[in-house]
Amino acid sequence: QLSGIQIDPSQFHHETSIEKDEPAVFPRDFHKHKLQLLTRDYSPDEASLVQLSHCHLHGIGVPSPNASLAIHYLEAAYHLAQSIQSAHSLALMYEYPQHSNHLVPTEIYAAFEWFKAAAEGGHVPSMAELPLCYELGC
C-alpha cells in the first residue's frame, strides 16, 4: 500500500514475494526494500512517474482528478528514481493549495518534510523555502 493506495501485484510483470497486508508509508517510514521487491525487474523512469502524477492531478486521460494517485506517483518518483524535483513538487502541493488544483489540504508539516528532503538532495528552491518553514515554526 502506497499513500493509501492498494498495490495490486497483477500490475507488475512478475510475481512478488511481499506479503499483501504489509503497508509502505511515505515519507519518513518508507520501507524502500519492500517496494524494491515489488519492482526488482522494473527500472523506474522519473519523467513517466511525474507525468502520471500530472495526469491524475489534472484529470487528463483519467475519469476524474485524483490527488491521492498524483501524490503516490510523485512519492514513487522520489523514492525509486531519487527525484528531488518530485520532493519539491510534493512540498508545494502540501503548502500551497493552488499547486494541487485545491485538491490537497494544506499540511505544513508534510510540506516541511518534503522541502527538507529536496533541500538535502541539493534542490535550490527548496533550500530557499526551508528557512521560511523554520522561521514560521513549521
Image (cartoon, helix red, strand yellow):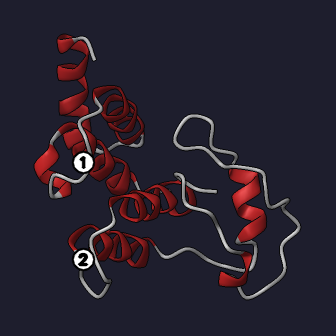
Relative to 119, residue 76 above or below: below
Q: Which mark is residue 59?
A: 2
| Residue at figure coordinates x 85%, y 59% from the top left | 19
| Residue at figure coordinates x 68%, y 51% from the top left | 32
In the rendered image, residue 69, in percent from the top left (x then y), is placed at 42, 64
Q: Is residue 28 left or right of residue 31?
A: left
Disc tally is 2
Q: Which mark is residue 111?
A: none
Q: Is residue 56 left or right of residue 44?
A: left
Q: Quadrant of the C terminus?
A: top left
| Residue at figure coordinates x 23%, y 36% from the top left | 106
Q: Rounded to the nearest whole Å, what is the CA distance between mark 2 and mark 1?
A: 16 Å
Identify the residue at the far front of this view. Answer: 63
The residue identified by callout 1 is 93
Query: In which quadrant of the rendered view does residue 28 lie?
Result: top right
N-terminal-most mark, 2 or 1: 2
Query: In which quadrant of the rendered view does residue 42 lie?
Result: bottom right
Q: What's the amino acid at mark 2?
A: Gly
Mark 2 nearby-residue class (10 Å; few <14, some 14–19, many ≥20): some
| Residue at figure coordinates x 23%, y 54% from the top left | 103
In the rendered image, residue 31, in percent from the top left (x then y), is placed at 70, 46
Q: What's the amino acid at mark 1?
A: Met
